[in-house]
Amino acid sequence: MEQIYFAGGCLWGVQEFMRHIPGVISTQAGRANGTSNRTDAEYDGYAECVHIDFDPEQIALGELIECLFEIIDPYSINQQGQDIGPKYRTGIYSREREHLDEAHRILKSREDYKQLTIEVLPLSNYVKSDDEHQDRLTRHPEDHSLCHIPLTLLYKYKKAANR
C-alpha cells in the first residue's frame, strides 16, 4: 500500500470521488502543509486535501493523477467551483520523492503544462479533518449541491463498481 495526498478544492467531493476508484483502499479528509496541528485554529496556509491509501498493483499513481484531473479545473488558482481561497488550491503531496518525481513527469508531459496551476510538493504537515468532514457526502448525500463536482461525475466509479 502507498499513500498520496490530493488537493482539489472542497475535500468533501474529492474524498467521495476518490473513495470509489478501484485500487483505492481508504481515504481521509484532511489538511496539507499548514503550520498548525489543530483544526480549530485560524487559516494557517493549509490546502484542503484527501489522504489516499492505494494499492499500486491495482492502480498506478499516474492513473490516480488522471482521475484527479477529471474533477478539477487545473488552470484555476485558489478556486474550484464556488469555493474560493488559497485553501482550495490544487495540489499533489507526498512524503515519497518517487511520487513527486512521477507527478512532475506526468504534468510536464501534458500539452497544457505551462497553464497548469497544480502544486507538487513534499508533504510537510498533515492534519486529519474533524469527524464531521469525514465521508461527508456518503453520510449526507443531500450536501452534494455544495460540491463543485457534478453529481454524475461524483459517483462515476461507484456506479461502475455496482455493476
Image (spheres, rainbow, N blue to C red):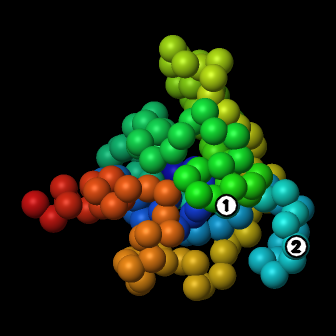
Residue 28 appears in the picture as rendered: yes
Q: Residues under labels 1 and 2: Cα distance?
A: 14 Å
Seen from the viewer's position, the closer of residues 80 and 25 is 80
Image: 147 above or below 149: below
SS label for mark 2: loop
Image: 115 above or below 137: above
Q: Quadrant of residue 118?
A: top right
* Residue furthest front in the image: 82
**Residue 49, x across and y down, in percent:** 63, 59
Q: Quadrant of residue 145?
A: bottom left
Identify which amino acid the numbered label 1 is placed on.
Answer: Glu
Whether tag 1 and tag 2 are in contact, CB under 8 A, the answer is: no
The C terminus is located in which quarter?
bottom left
- Left or right, 69 with respect to 74, comes to left
Q: Quadrant of residue 29?
A: bottom right
**Residue 92, x across and y down, in percent:** 63, 43
Image: 151 above or below 69: below
For residue 111, the mark is none
**Residue 89, x across and y down, in percent:** 69, 48
- Left or right, 61 with respect to 129, comes to left
For residue 42, the mark is 2
User: So how many labels did they put on this image?
Assistant: 2
Image: 155 above or below 74: below
* Residue furthest left in the image: 163
- Left or right, 73 with respect to 93, comes to left
Residue in the picture at 86% in, 77% down: 41
SS label for mark 1: strand
Residue in the picture at 81% in, 81% down: 40
Q: Which residue is mark 1?
A: 48
Identify which amino acid the numbered label 2 is placed on.
Answer: Glu
